[in-house]
Image (cartoon, rainbow, N blue to C red):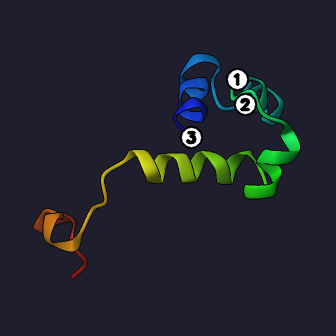
Amino acid sequence: MATTLQLVREVGYAAMTMDLIAERCDSSKATLYRFWPGKAVLVADSLRQALPEVSPSSTPARCAAT
């Protein structure tokens, strides 16, 4: 998943393809589609994994729901 985020930084989301991700990961596009239905879901999962989890207790009061 780090490779996905690296490619977003290198070529941008629009130019990044599942083919490019598969090539960079030394995998096949079919393998990627076995786990993710598309590029958007793969990027979202990659971001979820890379970013720290935010709990309600770590949210500033001005951002908390009222």
Dot 1 and dot 2 residues touching (CB under 8 Å): yes
What is the secondary structure assignment of the residue under circle 1? helix
* Crowd around label 2: few <14 · some 14–19 · many ≥20 (10 Å): many
Residue drawn at x 58%, y 30% is 3
Q: Number of marks in the image?
A: 3
Residue 12's quadrant in the figure? top right
Image x and y of residue 42, in percent: 65, 49
Q: CA distance from mark 1 to mark 2?
A: 5 Å
- The amino acid type, in three-letter code, at marker 3 is Met
- Kindly identify which numbered label has been placed on residue 21: 2
- Identify the mark nearer the N-term, 1 or 3: 3
Please rate how many residues cluster around mark 3, counting C-alpha atoms within 10 Å: few if below 14, some from 14 to 19, many from 20: some
Q: Looking at the rendered structure, which numbered label has been put on residue 1?
A: 3
Residue positioned 78% across, 33% down in the render: 27
* Amino acid at pointer 1: Arg
CA gap, disc 1 to disc 3? 11 Å
Left or right placement of residue 10 versus residue 16 in this view = left
Where is residue 51? Give x, y as percent: 36, 48
Horizontal and vertical percent position of residue 13: 65, 32
Give the position of the N terminus as an image quadrant.
Answer: top right
Q: Nearer the viewer, residue 12 or 35?
A: 35
Q: Which mark is residue 24?
A: 1
